Structure formats: C-alpha cells, structure tokens
Amino acid sequence: MDALADLHAAFWHKVDDGSLAWMPNSYPSIMSDGLFEGTAANYENFSNVFSDLLTPELRNAKQGYLEALPGIQSWINDGPRTVIHGDFRLDNLFFKTTGHTIEVACCDWQASVRGKGMHDVAYFLSGNIDIGLRREHEQTLIKRWLDALNSCGVTGYGYEQALEDYRKAILVLWSYVVNNGGLATEDQRDEDWVSAQVARHAAAMTDHECLSLLR
C-alpha cells in the first residue's frame, strides 16, 4: 500500500497536463474495448469452467454486466486521476529489506493507463491475497493507502469515497477475471493462479455486493 501510494501521489491530478499524453486513458482505449469484447465472448465458458467457485448470481450476471460495463469502465477513468500500474500483483513485485525498512519495486508496466488509483488497490487486495486475510485486513490497508497519500500531500479524497470507489473498482475488475478465466492454458502454475484469482475475486464481489451497483 505504501508503494502504491508513492506511485499514485506522484501523479495525482498531474496526468492531464500533456506530459503523459502518450499513455492511454483507462477508457475509452484499446484495452477497455478488448476487455468488453473478451467479457462478452468468454462469460459463458468462464461460468461453466468455474461454476463451483461462483454464486448463481455471478454465473448469471452476463447480460446485466455487459449492459453496464461501458459505464463502469468510464467511471474508472474519472477523477481523481493518476497513473495506474494495471497489473500490481505479487508476481510483479520485488522486495528489499534494509534494517527495519522494506522497499518495493515493480516490473511489467505494459498495462499502465491513466485513471483512478483505486484500480491498483482493488486489483491487489481482491485478487492477490487469501480471502481470509483480505477480509481481516482490507479496511486497514485501504486506510494505510489513504494515510500514505495524505503524507505525500494528496488532499480532498476521504475514506468513505475510497470505500465506495473500492466496491466499484472490484466490479470493473470482474471483466479482467472473466477474460483471464476464459483463456486456455496447459501450464499448471497459470491454471492455479487463475483459479485462485477467480475464487478470491468472486468472494470480494459477493462480500461487497458489487452486482447491486449495476442497478
């Protein structure tokens, strides 16, 4: 959370001054178009393959989710805007310990876009840590991210807004999960990772009643 806050604070409200015009927006973009098309194409197969990990509501959400998805994608592009890493997960992180200090470095920036920083927070918390740990610590970690933003000079973004944005970001990221789950793989590690991501994100979708946001 501290490393994400450092990234997000450095570009908070600074991505639209022309210096980062080369970096795509979260929406509309080739990426958002691809996610929509992939979700439409993969949802039924995804629901069948991972039926044991999904609630009936999630298995049957295709039509309502697709109807709402462009609006959801547009929301993640709204302010406050910053640089989104886009694939902030443990496979892409490196840790260095010096005394009592832990430094974090991140690789794989090919999915970077401009949009809401909460995208990265929700991606990491909902898909990359065990469900029990996420449930126990997510509010504390969101507050830690906010506190770190504030210590870097970011103002005007409070906890209640962050929690609402967290729910919406989980909903946006469901399209990533559907696309990843719809990809065939012969690699056991990839298969295990995708299954874990589906289970964790499905739990977050249910815990936070994200489908209710479609209404």
Image (tube, rainbow, N blue to C red):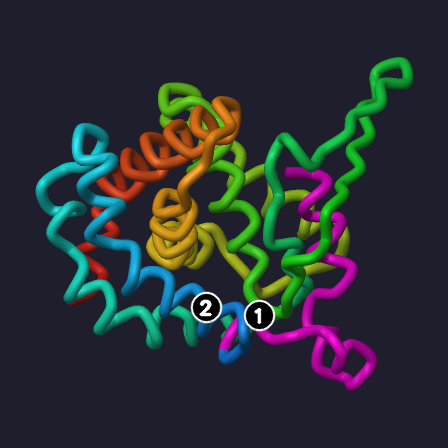
Quadrant assignment for the N terminus: top right
Residue appearing at x 25%, y 71% in the figure: 68
Q: Amino acid at mark 2?
A: Gly
212 or 200: which is nearer to us? 200
User: Where's residue 87, x and y in %?
Assistant: 60, 48
The secondary structure that most of the magenta stretch takes on is loop
- The stretch of residues the image draws in magenta is 1-27
Query: Which residue position is annotated with label 2?
Result: 34
Q: Is residue 20 magenta?
A: yes
Q: Residue furthest bottom?
A: 18
Q: Amino acid at mark 1?
A: Pro
In the picture provided, is 213 more to the left or to the right than 11?
Answer: left
Which is nearer the N-term, disc 1 or disc 2?
Answer: 2
Quadrant assignment for the C terminus: bottom left
Query: Which residue position is annotated with label 1?
Result: 80
37 or 74: which is nearer to us? 37
Q: Is residue 91 magenta?
A: no
In the picture provided, is 3 more to the left or to the right than 138?
Answer: right
In the picture provided, is 92 more to the left or to the right than 161?
Answer: right
